[in-house]
């Protein structure tokens, strides 16, 4: 198994994202997907939202899930253009992923509003609408996840960009160099009865 990310700055930015995911959940797994010249990573969070980031590179096999701690060590400790991302744990990935887009820009949430929502949101209120723009309702859990990743502070209190693709919403708040974001399905999927 090989993860290739030629740029040192890209490797550092991906390591930062994975490190933040692992701090939230030491047992987190990260799904890596090759997208023709880009490697895209996905990780779940305790807030029931996904974190994603992408950078120029490749991964072989083209779709693999690895422990977040293994990937963090490969990116942060080894720090080479090609690394072994860790042991495949594909059976530990749960849930689906959004499509490739296109994403429609909807608006921006002021960083101060993220802090305000986090300050007033308790566990029972995570699914309440915390922000709405362009017909897209953002549950409080998404803004709590943005804060949990430490992104408003990291971005220098820049607004959090909100986008959607019709089925998923995307909050672009992490390092712009790797297109880091929080994503969540806008509506729950219907369970199939058998």
Image (cartoon, helix red, strand yellow):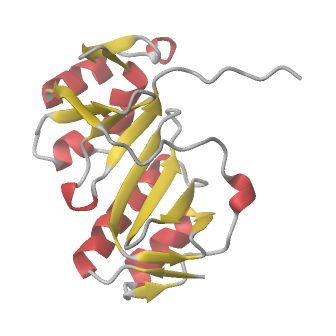
The residue closer to the viewer here, 116 or 136, is 136
- Quarter location, residue 102: top left
Compared with 96, 69 (above or below) is below
Across and down, in percent, residue 93 comes to 66, 51
Across and down, in percent, residue 163 comes to 28, 33
Residue shown at the point (34%, 36%) measured from the top left: 170
Classify the position of the N terminus by image quarter: bottom right
- Quarter location, residue 18: bottom left
Across and down, in percent, residue 78 comes to 43, 86
Residue shown at the point (40%, 27%) measured from the top left: 166
Compared with 90, 136 (above or below) is above
Residue shown at the point (48%, 42%) measured from the top left: 98
The residue closer to the viewer here, 125 or 168, is 168
Compared with 155, 39 (above or below) is below
Across and down, in percent, residue 124 comes to 51, 12
- Image-based side of 39 in relation to 136, left or right: right
Residue shown at the point (37%, 87%) measured from the top left: 81
- Image-based side of 30 in relation to 145, left or right: right
């Amino acid at each position: 198994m090989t993860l290739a990310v030629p740029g040192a700055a890209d490797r550092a930015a991906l390591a930062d994202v994975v490190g933040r995911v692992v701090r939230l959940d030491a047992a987190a797994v990260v799904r890596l997907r090759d997208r023709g010249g880009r490697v895209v990573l996905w990780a779940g969070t305790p807030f029931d939202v996904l974190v994603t980031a992408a950078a120029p590179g490749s991964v072989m096999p083209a779709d693999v899930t690895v422990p977040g701690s293994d990937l963090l060590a490969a990116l942060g400790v080894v720090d080479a253009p090609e690394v072994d991302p860790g042991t495949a744990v594909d059976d530990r990935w749960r849930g689906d992923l959004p499509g490739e887009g296109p994403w429609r820009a909807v608006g921006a949430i002021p960083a101060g509003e993220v802090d305000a929502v986090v300050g007033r949101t308790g566990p029972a209120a995570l699914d309440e609408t915390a922000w709405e723009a362009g017909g897209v309702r953002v549950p409080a859990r998404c803004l709590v996840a943005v804060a949990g990743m430490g992104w408003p502070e990291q971005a220098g209190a820049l607004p959090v960009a909100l986008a959607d693709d019709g089925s998923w919403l995307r909050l672009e708040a992490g390092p712009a160099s790797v297109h880091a974001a929080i994503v969540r399905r806008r509506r729950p999927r219907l369970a199939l009865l058998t």
